[in-house]
Amino acid sequence: MTRVLFVSRSTLFTQAGGDTLQMEQTAKYLQKSGYRVTFYNGSPLEEEDYDILHFFNITRPADLLPFLNWKLPKVLSAIYIDYSEYDRLYRKGLAGRTARIAGSSGAEYLKTLARGVLGKDRMPPLSYITLGQKQSIQRVLEKCDLVITASQHEYEALASGFSFKCGHEIIPLGSEHLSAPAPYSGERSGVVCAARIEGLKNQLSLIRALNDSGIHLKIIGKPAANQMAYLEECQKEARSNVEFTGFMNQNDLALEFSKAKVHVLPSYYETTGLSTLEALKMGCQVVITARGGQKEIFGEHAFYCDPNDPGSIWEAINKALESKFDHSKWVWENFSWVAAAGKISDIYRSLLQQS
């Protein structure tokens, strides 16, 4: 039995996100194929107890650095998001001012140190403190044998900022984690937005686009601790046609997607956008940002908007409301955790044969 160690940010389960779901689903289907998968939880480990190291989320390199001296084959699922434009143009408050002065990497470095000092995360290792954010990412990439991205755009964004010579594979995400609810007998109506509530996801522009429109908007999700001011801004801006539901589990979310006509995610930057996949699978039309390689992934199966412009968001929503095309079969056929795990298994076998 091949023994795999998954390593990612230490807050993976206390502040769950798309990377949490990706790791859980990948582990689930690898285990069904006979692998033993362990999630690193901070406890002392012995290198000889594992055969493969699999890193997730390169934007949090401090958690990956302690394992770079291990001699095992190393795979990285990048989950790379370039925050530089958002930080420079749109991020508010102290974080925004810091990013504009120190750059995105400098701001992330200071945030990592602050989380450790304040006890909100493990203290970063000395190697991270010495190298900084950008050079830590560079060091991780240099030590990996293969990098996995969800799209060519994600790979090109990563390659434009860093130098690495290891192999590369594009492996789309899956959708099996969201099960279809009992059939909804009513007529689809309204708009939903399911995402973590934060400036990057841009719920505020969506609210402004639909305020007093007569279209019911459900904002599904909760903010991170450092995004409470943004939530309050959204709530203050919202009119009576906007509803904030808070967090929903996967079953309730599937039901909301089966009842809604359109799902909107007007982020300033996205990779795949798991909630977009989930909504399409449940029969929603989707409106998404034109940024971050979304057109490469979704093509003609989405309507696109400029996240800066509420008018553009409104126009895309109106087009989506008029559409009757069912995209669910396309999602089922092209986004599979089973297929993703199969490709990752092939990568593991190839690397072990070479080692």
Image (tube, rainbow, N blue to C red):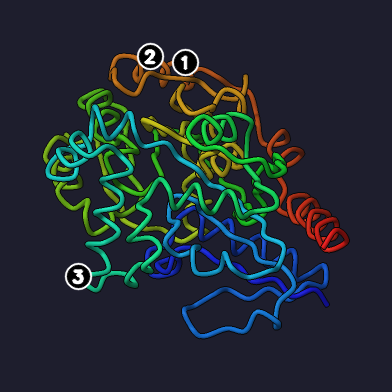
**Residue closer to the observer: 252 or 346:** 346
Which one is earlier in the sequence, the residue at label 1 or at label 3? 3
Task: Tell me how far mark 1 sits from mark 3, CA to CA.
Answer: 47 Å
Instruction: Identify residue type, mark 1.
Output: Lys
Question: Do we see residue 182 in this rendering?
Answer: no
Q: From the viewer's perspective, is residue 67 above or below residue 108? A: below
Q: Position of residue 159 (x, y in %)?
A: 56, 33
Q: From the viewer's perspective, is residue 17 above or below residue 30? A: above
Q: Are marks 3 and 2 in contact (CB under 8 Å)?
A: no
Instruction: Identify residue type, mark 2.
Output: Glu
Task: Tell me how far mark 2 sits from mark 1, CA to CA.
Answer: 6 Å
The residue under the point 51% across, 40% down is 273
Numbered tag placed on residue 319 in the rendering: 1
Which one is earlier in the sequence, the residue at label 3 or at label 2? 3
- Residue located beneath label 3 in the image: 118
Drawn side of residue 271 relative to residue 202, left or right: right
The residue under the point 20% across, 70% down is 118
The residue under the point 53% across, 36% down is 158
Q: Position of residue 335 (x, y in %)?
A: 70, 42
Q: From the viewer's perspective, is residue 319 above or below residue 80? A: above
Quarter-of-image position of residue 169: top right
Numbered tag placed on residue 302 in the rendering: none
- Residue located beneath label 2 in the image: 315
Indicate the secondary structure of the residue bearing disc 1: helix
Q: Position of residue 106 (x, y in %)?
A: 28, 45
Indicate the secondary structure of the residue bearing disc 3: loop
